[in-house]
Image (cartoon, rainbow, N blue to C red):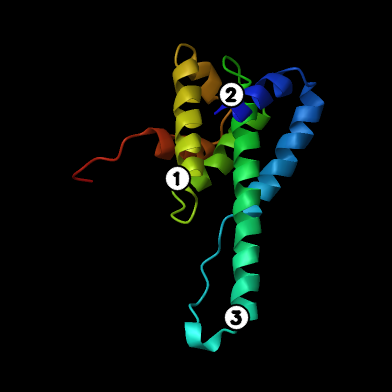
Amino acid sequence: NAATSALTGILATMPQSALEELVAKYIRIANKSIKKKKKKIADADVSKEEAEEKAAKEKQRAKRQQRSVFVLCAVVMGRPYDTPPYIPEALAALSKHSFEQRASMGVRDEVKRVCSEFKRTHTDNWEAHKKQFTQEQLEALEDVVSTPHYYA
């Protein structure tokens, strides 16, 4: 999307130390924005005010999720041919949003697109880039970019 592309260009000009701080901040926001499963309460037990408050909180959570995911996507896209230390952390945080059913399709699709694009642009020298990742981070990235097998 155009906003993410513009942000990618802006972030590419930032010093690495500032990017590291920004990534750490948005990883925290992204991780907090994943909706936790709660016990379902019967609609009859919830007042109109409580329902409105719950809807407002959900709207705010969804906005935080979208904003944090798009910032992290822009950071990743700003490094198309190298892998600074904050990129594997950002990709691992993003991967959590690709399978979250309550995330909007725009968020899930953007995460999948960015992870696939990262893998594509780093294919030529993948063995060197791979060393920047922990095993968990690699598995998180592979979970997003690999196509599910029909018989698996």
Nearest-to-viewer mark from 3 and 1: 3
* Residue 131 in which image quadrant: top right
The CA span between labels 1 and 2 is: 19 Å
- All told, the count of numbered labels is 3
Instruction: Estimate how packed mark 2 is, as few (under 14), some (14 to 19) or many (20 or more) residues with alpha carbons within 10 Å.
Output: many
- Proximity of marks 1 and 2: CB atoms separated by less than 8 Å: no
Judging by the rendered image, the residue that carries numbered circle 2 is 77
Q: Earlier in the sequence, mark 3 or mark 1?
A: 3
User: Dot 3, how many residues are within 10 Å of its Cα: few (below 14), some (14-19), or many (20+)?
Assistant: few
Q: From the image, tell me which residue sits under label 1.
A: 105
The amino acid type of the residue labelled 1 equals Met
Instruction: Find the residue positioned furthest to the bottom.
Output: 45
**Residue 37 place in picture, x, y as percent:** 51, 67
Image quarter for residue 150? top left
Element type at marker 2?
helix
Q: Is residue 17 above or below residue 67?
A: above
8 vs 22: above or below: above
Q: Nearer the viewer, residue 21 or 59?
A: 59
Between marks 3 and 1, how big is the CA–CA gap?
Answer: 28 Å
From the top left corner, tell me how far across and down residue 94 is, in percent. 55, 40
Q: Residue 48 — which label?
A: 3
The disc labelled 3 sits on which kind of residue? Lys
Residue 62 percent across, percent down from the top left: 59, 53
Label 2 is placed on what type of residue? Met
Can you name the residue that lies furthest to the top here?
A: 124
Q: Position of residue 24 (x, y in %)?
A: 73, 40
Seen at 50% across and 82% down, the residue is: 41
Cα–Cα gap, marks 3 and 2: 43 Å
- Mark 1, mark 2: which one is toward the viewer? 1
| Pair 3/2: label in front | 3
